Image (tube, grey):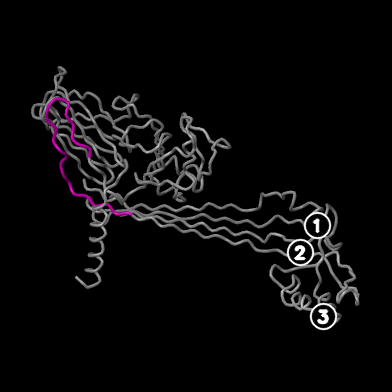
Amino acid sequence: MTRIARTVSLLLVMFLLAAITVFGQGIVTGSISATVLDPQGAVVPGAEVRATQVETNRVFSTVSSNAGVVQLPSLPPGTYRVNIQVKGFSTYNAEQVAVQVGKDTGLGPINLKLGNTAETVTVEGAAPLVESTTDQISQTFDTKEVANIPLGNTYDSFVLFSPGVATAGSGGFSNNNGAELSINGQRARSNNYQLDGQNNNDNTIGGPSIFFGNQDTIGELQVVTNFDAEYGRNMGGVVNYITKGGTNEFHATGFEFWQGDHFDSLQNQEKSPLFGFCPSGVSPSTGCAAAVVPQFVQNQFGGTIGGPIKRNKVWFFGSTNFQRTRTAGAPFASNPDLTPTANGIQQLQSAFPNNPAVGALAQFGPATIKIGNPTFSNIQNVPVSADGGATTVPIEMGELTRFLAQPGSFLHPVYFSADHSVQRGLPRTSGSGSRPNRECPWAQSADWA
């Protein structure tokens, strides 16, 4: 192994170790539950249960308790295959079992059929019509829903599609970032924004602190309007962004959003003759300014890439997005005030050569500063007196207009994650109705399975 390869390997190991040493404080996982029964409805203890994540082949295993209860907590969101085996019964397979963040996917009572484990009964998983394991009310927007609606970097606006949510508007009584949401009648500052379960609240003015500009990075957008004690902190609701992770398949995306001025119209201050613009049918040669739609170009583009570093073991995912905004200059005019033209300054210097005010005009005056392509209109001779009125001379003056360019903006955030997995069994359950302790998810998308 070359020195460069050893260095890269060492850096990768250090990154993974650093990632798994920080515990997450929020909710970034879901769970699967079921009750295993025989054909007569009696509970079946000791059944071996394996849940395999389709995207990564990560395996989570446990056994049913003495009461036949199956609990698979702390599962990363995704699609799973659930396999149940026990001696004397046919193998049970549930396909396409969806696990969402903060939710328990209840498979309900599962009646095994008599037979041997070589026989397999396969069913398709489906979302339960009624949430029977918690009183929590939540709604989840998946990655396809988020990507199909281009909202720029205000994806918390999706919360407005949830029942019990309205925009606070002028009733917010405070400054807020983002969509200013009122959930269940609470203040806009009473919401808890999370990013992969971590605190994403702007404690200064309320609302989210970090905004997403790349919709392809979001795996789920979860909205909890009636939450359990595990969330806490705020009385309103919880808005949780869950980012994607790498899988066993290489996948990349790219996007571009463009917004321009081609369909824009002029505002009153950009076309009114009161501001020096030409009325309809009047040529700028008469001294007025032509009304032109100001330039505005915004490009928002980026992409994602993810895949395996080592299949079934280590995965990576990275994304970035760029936002560039370019605008034309805005007109600044001195009208109705008059200021000396370049010729007028020369006249002042000839008439009052030792006057300090004339010297300042010649060095720093409006006509001297060439930024914004200054032009004069309504030029006229104005009598000017100095030295106590002893000398009066006509000085050329006019109304000055210049176009000052607005500063453009450039934004390019980068996101990267790496996941590392080894197979392990979940804690076994025993006793009637007992359940394993909830495990803390790992931060920085480094999950041990």
Measured as percent of width and height from the top left, residue 306 is found at 34, 53
**Amino acid under disc 3:** Gln
Q: Is residue 357 found left or right of 228 in the rendered image?
A: right
- Disc 3 packing (10 Å; few <14; some 14–19; many ≥20): some
Task: Please give the name of the residue rendered at 72% of the width and 74% of the height, measured from the top-left corner.
Answer: 364
Residue 16 place in picture, x, y as percent:
25, 57
Picture layout, residue 195 above or below residue 105: below
Q: Quadrant of the N terminus?
A: bottom left
152 vs 41, left or right, is: right
Q: Is the residue under label 2 in contact with that under label 1 (CB below 8 Å)?
A: yes
Residue range (magenta): 417-438
Ranked by sequence position, the earlier of labels 3 and 1 is: 1
Whether 228 is among the magenta residues is no
Tag count in the figure? 3
Residue with the mark numbered 2: 401
Label number found at residue 276: 1
Q: Is mark 2 on a helix, strand or loop?
A: strand
Seen as rendered, the residue at the extreme left is 87
Q: Residues within 10 Å of mark 1 (few under 14, many from 20)?
A: many
Q: What element carries label 3?
A: helix
